[in-house]
Image (tube, helix red, strand yellow):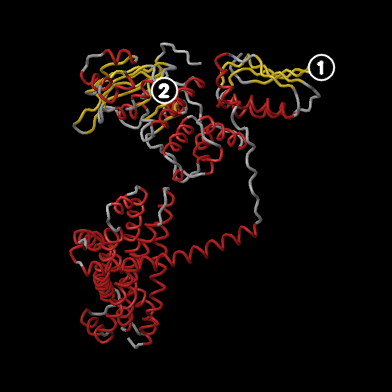
Amino acid sequence: MNGEAMLTSKRTGERLVLTAAGAWTAVHAHDLEPLVEAQAQSSQPVRAVDIDIAGVKRLDTFGAWLIERLARAWIERGCDTKIVGLPEDYRGLMQEIHAVNLKPPPSPVEESRIIKGLDAIGRTIVGIGRATVLIVQMLGAVSAAAGRAIAHPARFRLTSLVAHVDRVGWHGVPIMLLVTFLIGAILAQQGIFHFRKFGADIFVIDMIGILVLREVGVLIVCVMVAGRSGSAYTAELGSMKMREEIDALRTMGFDPIEVLILPRIVALIISVPILTFLGSMSALYGGGLVAWFYGGIDPDVFLSRLREAISLDTFAVGMIKAPIMALIIGIVASVEGMEVRGSAESLGAHTTASVVISIFLVIVLDGFFAIFFASIGM
Amino acid sequence: MAKRTEEAVIRVRDLSVGFRDKLVLDHLDLDVYRGEVLGFVGGSGSGKSVLMRTIIGLLPKRSGKVEVFGIDVDAISEEELQAIERRWGILFQHGALYSSLTVRQNIQFPIREFLDVSERLLDEMAVAKLEMVGLAADVQQKYPAELSGGMTKRVALARALALDPEIVFLDEPTSGLDPIGAGEFDELIKTLQRTLGLTVFMVTHDLDSLHAVCDRIAVIADGKVILAGPMSVMLASEHPWLKAYFRGKRSRIVAG
């Protein structure tokens, strides 16, 4: 015998003898299963079946189960089925296997596509509703915590705040400056290239000034902060949730909102306006440089034109939006972080959701601000 | 099927493992024989888990040799190593179940990757393994986060046994279980070891486990195996740490 797994059959009258031989192990399961199925399905008119496994050299749970499956198939058809020649070594294993898989597997519930589709839509809508409620709840909880912190300033976690401002603000400065510089430069280059056709290159300065200070500066910074710090907040809170650190805080009488979330959100509210200011300046600088070297507009001309084009309102519009955007990013990041459940996949899904939802809300909110400021004439 | 032969399935020779300037395992020798349950004990931080993780290839060694099934694991190709890795199963201390997969998917994962078998057989084997570790079939739809500590250990054991390994490594299998659950788990290990003919390498602190299931015990101290042998040898030893461990206050009920 060469160790190959085999199953042969021999019929004498109403008695069928199935002889198994070789190594009935996991690695041979692929070859054995069709053999077993063929014998289990075969329609030989017999009353008694002997499964002779004396020739089996090695047996593991895969092989034992296949033999058991074969035996059960014949028993189901009312045949007198016996397993013979069981080596003493494998008696325990066969007994163990004889006791498993006795319950029929639950038949999978087939749902129609329409119901599945409707189900998905329903779940999404309920999900959106739930997310809205959670965001409003978090906003309330953070406001309450802020109120308590104002009433008892000693309870506010200043150290934590400083650490977070360092992380989201100070450490974010270089990348914010770089990105906004590039955006300013690109806006200027595109503006000059197209406006030149009408001989209106000089109006590029108006465009850059208004666009950067009102919209682009704050939007770019918010998108970057959502990706850089919002995601970090969600991942931190989420993994603390998974490791029961948040439960530990609660049981020691601390409010996780007060200890973990409030300092993070306040750090964002402090950092984002500063980053917006620096980013806007950087974008104007980038625009100015391109206007000078690419458009041939002298810095003096650029500055005096800029002074005419923009007012304090233009600057104020951008800066007023910044802390509110920061609040939105912080709230969404915290909500998603606290919603993380046990699995690694859930952490990933909520971190993604945190970034996507906060960028979406920032842009939607920016639209409302545009309408609001237009109607109050700013 | 638990015929004990004096064939060493794991042979560790002159093994040194360290981190930075600290030597955790200092020229350590150890044999694990086919078909035995070896309990591996030692103080906290003495390098029990380090040895286990070095044998299964998770930690690099400074010097020395590890032979599994008589093959030096450093001298073989990636494919040959993979073939050896299929012949052992590991129960990590905290289960290490894949949190994004259901219990059934966790057990089927190694089978699906290494063996080309039908979906029907996959499903049947998942249930078979679950029932063999003493769980009901309806656990299979659950996610690891929904399981209790004892269930997590059992599912992790079912996954470790998925490919019918010859060696099973258990890292503190009964830690975190209540005494009844731990006793049942010991019983389960013993039963499975007998029916499947396993060789078991068990890192443990549980004196009850050591008494109930281990054929032999190896003790590590100062980076070396200071004593290896059955329980009677442990109890007879006059080494101060062993005396404190096996004949201390906490051991009197079991030992006495």
Query: Disc 2 designates what residue?
Result: B200
Horizontal side of A5 relative to B210 (left or right) equals right
The image shows residue B216 at horizontal and vertical percentages of 36, 17
Mark 1 belongs to which subunit? A
SS at mark 2?
strand
Query: Disc 1 designates what residue?
Result: A13
Kindly indicate whether the residues beneath marks 2 and 1 are on one polypeptide chain.
no
Name the one closer to the observer, A364 or A159. A159
Q: For the residue marked with disc 2, what is the amino acid?
A: Val
The image shows residue A277 at horizontal and vertical percentages of 25, 73
| Position of B230 relative to A335 (above/below) | above
| Position of B120 relative to A42 (above/below) | below
Q: For the residue marked with disc 1, what is the amino acid?
A: Gly
Q: Which quarter of the picture shows residue A353? A: bottom left
Name the one closer to the observer, B125 or A369. B125
Mark 2 belongs to which subunit? B
Q: Are marks 2 and 1 in contact (CB under 8 Å)?
A: no
Name the one closer to the observer, B235 or B226. B235
- What count of labels does the image hold? 2
Q: Residue at x 70, y 19 (%)?
A: A18
Q: CA distance from mark 2 to mark 1?
A: 48 Å
Name the one closer to the observer, B30 or A310. B30
The image shows residue B33 at horizontal and vertical percentages of 40, 16
For the C terminus of chain B, the quadrant is top left
The image shows residue A253 at horizontal and vertical percentages of 27, 55
Q: Residue at x 32, y 64 (%)?
A: A225
